Image: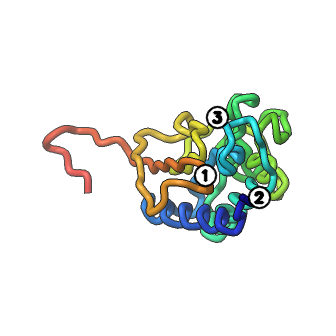
Amino acid sequence: MEPDFEQITAQARTATTELLDAASLRAGDLFVVGCSSSEVLGGRIGKASSQEAARAVFGGIYPILRERGIYLAAQCCEHLNRALIVEGVCAERYGYEPVCVVPQPHAGGSFAVQAWRAFERPTAVERIRVHAGLDIGGTLIGMHLREVAVPVRLSLDHIGQAILLCARTRPRFIGGSRAVYE
């Protein structure tokens, strides 16, 4: 059966919109996406990289983030130690030190390649702390989340054939029983 890339784009758009609403992100916040294009098409992570699937997912996510002024951090695969591709202005704003690498389909991943091609001034960084994110296909975005991570359930649990896990973050609660948080 031929993949329905329009449906994949629509699913990515829905997931992004729902997570942004649940996380109450503001302009200038950071949003990470780890995406296995292999898993989106029903393959095994890292074994069937697809630029078409990555383009479909990216097309559902990036325009919404850009419209809201939220920075996308595209997570690379394990071959690049899960480095992230961000806009140069984002790296500068948050003080992230750039590293020298250009993602490729089998060394970085197809989603990171799409980000690299779409960003005005793409920059690779090793570490980041984001406000929310989508893990599409078991890519392990947790290492990039700020403390405290909170799982978010959406109206869908897959993009294509890939399992979708989402998280937002919140500030830590401190102070005990006498503290007031709101």
Q: Can residue 4 be seen?
A: yes
Q: In screen coordinates, is 57 left or right of 156?
A: right
Q: Dividing the image into 4 quarters, which one contains the N terminus?
A: bottom right
Q: Earlier in the sequence, mark 1 or mark 2?
A: 2
Q: Can residue 91 be seen?
A: no
The single residue placed furthest to the front in the displayed view is: 1
| Residue at the spot 74% in from the left edge and 53% down from the top edge | 54
Instruction: Please state which of residues 29 and 112 is positioned toward the viewer in this rendering.
Output: 112
Q: Secondary structure at mark 2?
A: helix
Q: Is residue 1 above or below residue 126?
A: below
Q: Nearer the viewer, mark 1 or mark 2?
A: 1
| Residue at the spot 53% in from the left edge and 66% down from the top edge | 17
Read off the residue under disc 2.
55
| Residue at the spot 60% in from the left edge and 58% down from the top edge | 28
Q: CA distance from mark 1 to mark 2?
A: 16 Å
Q: CA distance from mark 3 to mark 2?
A: 24 Å
Instruction: Please state which of residues 158 and 32 is positioned toward the viewer in this rendering.
Output: 158
**Answer yes or no: do the residues labelled 3 and 2 have beta carbons within 8 Å?**
no
Q: Nearer the viewer, mark 3 or mark 1?
A: 1
Read off the residue under disc 1.
161
Mark 3 is surrounded, within 10 Å at the Cα level, by few (under 14), some (14 to 19) or many (20 or more) other residues, namely: some
Q: In screen coordinates, is 107 left or right of 174?
A: right
Q: Secondary structure at mark 1?
A: loop
Identify which amino acid the numbered label 2 is placed on: Arg
Q: Dividing the image into 4 quarters, which one contains the C terminus?
A: bottom left
Instruction: Please state which of residues 107 and 37 is positioned toward the viewer in this rendering.
Output: 37
Mark carried by residue 127: 3
Q: Nearer the viewer, mark 3 or mark 2?
A: 2
Q: Quadrant of residue 75?
A: top right
What x and y, as percent, mark residue 135? 57, 46
